[in-house]
Image (spheres, rainbow, N blue to C red):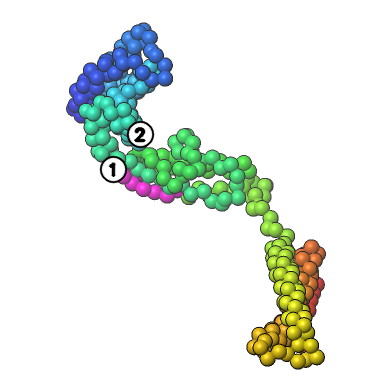
Amino acid sequence: MVTRMRFRSGLLAAALLAGSLARVGGARAQTSPDLAEGRQLFVEALADEEHGRFAAALEKYKRVQAIRDTVNVRYRIGAALEGLGRVARAVDAYGAAVKLGVDNGTDADVVRGAQARLDLLRPRIAHLAVHVTPQTFGDVEVQVDSEPVPAQALGDVAVDPGPHVVTASAKGARPFRAPITLSEGGRAGVPVVLEPLSGEPAPQPPPPPPPGSDRAATYRTVGLVTGAAGGVLILGGAVVLVLRAGAISKLHDNCPSGSCPASQQQDLTSTRDRALAFGPLGGVMLGVGALAVGTGIVLFTVAGRDTQTATRIVPVTTTQGAMLNLVRRF
């Protein structure tokens, strides 16, 4: 009864198809014999569908689609797939019919019919989530009912309700096979556990980097940064000492024999204060800069040595202040 109702609704699609096949368009122009063959195939496919010969109808609808792809043809492909119980594929075909009709702004009645079938069938689709472990095997091929599934689609594989078989294969691994049965709208996860072939060790993940390689990279980076900072401090200290020398020269010029003019007393006092402050400041900057440059050189040198030798920079307090000491552990 349901099939006959679908067939009657398809008569409208058949009438519309006769007009759509006659329109010129597409990537290539069809000749009159092509269009005549398409019309004849479509009529035969409708008859096959009416009598429940859905596989034959599907094959003919696809041949019509090769001649001219229309909303009506895609709708009928969906109907044939639905008759075969291939709900997931039928949803794809109905969805393609809706998209084509909306994009082209044509066949509104057929688009509404396809959308109605989509709304009815989508809740019936079952879903599989396939998880492959371990990840050490490369080029894993997963199939559901002998059809390959792309890696990006493993998390949600739309399938028909009913029994299915999940298989997986990879070089150096035993073939995996797991049957599963899903109800309408059901969801299930399938863990694919790959085991190495007998007598062969399991593939190993890539070896970790050599011991100390990360530390060596860190030493190089810190050494470069520290050395660069030291260079900036040395340059800054040199500038400060030059400014100090300029202040002292100004005092000598304006205060011969230590006697300064009363009119310039305030300015010369400020110049004297700068000279007094710039001396220690410039010296400290030069000293710290030289220490930083030296530390940077040491760190960069240590990074290039044997990574199996642990080297640490340890600050040490002395009676003279502080210094950096190298501690090496073998």
State which tag comes first along the sequence, 1 or 2.
2
Q: Residue furthest top?
A: 33
* Badge number at residue 175: none
In the image, the segment drawn in magenta is: 182-190
* Res. 275 image quadrant: bottom right
- Expressed as whole percent of the image width and height from the top left, the position of residue 309 reads 79, 69
Say whether marks 1 and 2 touch (CB < 8 Å). no
User: Could you tell whether 252 is left or right of 112 in the image?
Assistant: right
The residue closer to the viewer here, 49 or 72, is 72
Residue positioned 34% across, 15% down in the render? 24
- Expressed as whole percent of the image width and height from the top left, the position of residue 16 reads 24, 19
* Badge number at residue 123: 1
Q: Is residue 268 visible?
A: yes
Residue at which label 2 appears: 92
User: Could you tell whether 313 is left or right of 161 in the image?
Assistant: right
The residue closer to the viewer here, 155 or 267, is 267
Residue at disc 2, secondary structure: helix
Residue positioned 57% across, 50% down in the render? 135
Residue 49 covered by magenta stretch: no
Quadrant for the C terminus, please: bottom right
- Amino acid tagged 2: Asp
Give the vertical position of 199 relative to 256 (above or below): above
- Amino acid tagged 1: Pro
Count neighbours of disc 1 (C-alpha within 10 A) and say few if under 14, some if 14 to 19, many if 20 or more. Answer: few
User: Could you tell whether 141 is left or right of 50 in the image?
Assistant: right
- Expressed as whole percent of the image width and height from the top left, the position of residue 130 reads 46, 47
Residue positioned 38% across, 12% down in the render? 30
* Res. 27 image quadrant: top left
Quadrant for the N terminus, please: top left
Residue positioned 27% across, 21% down in the render? 49
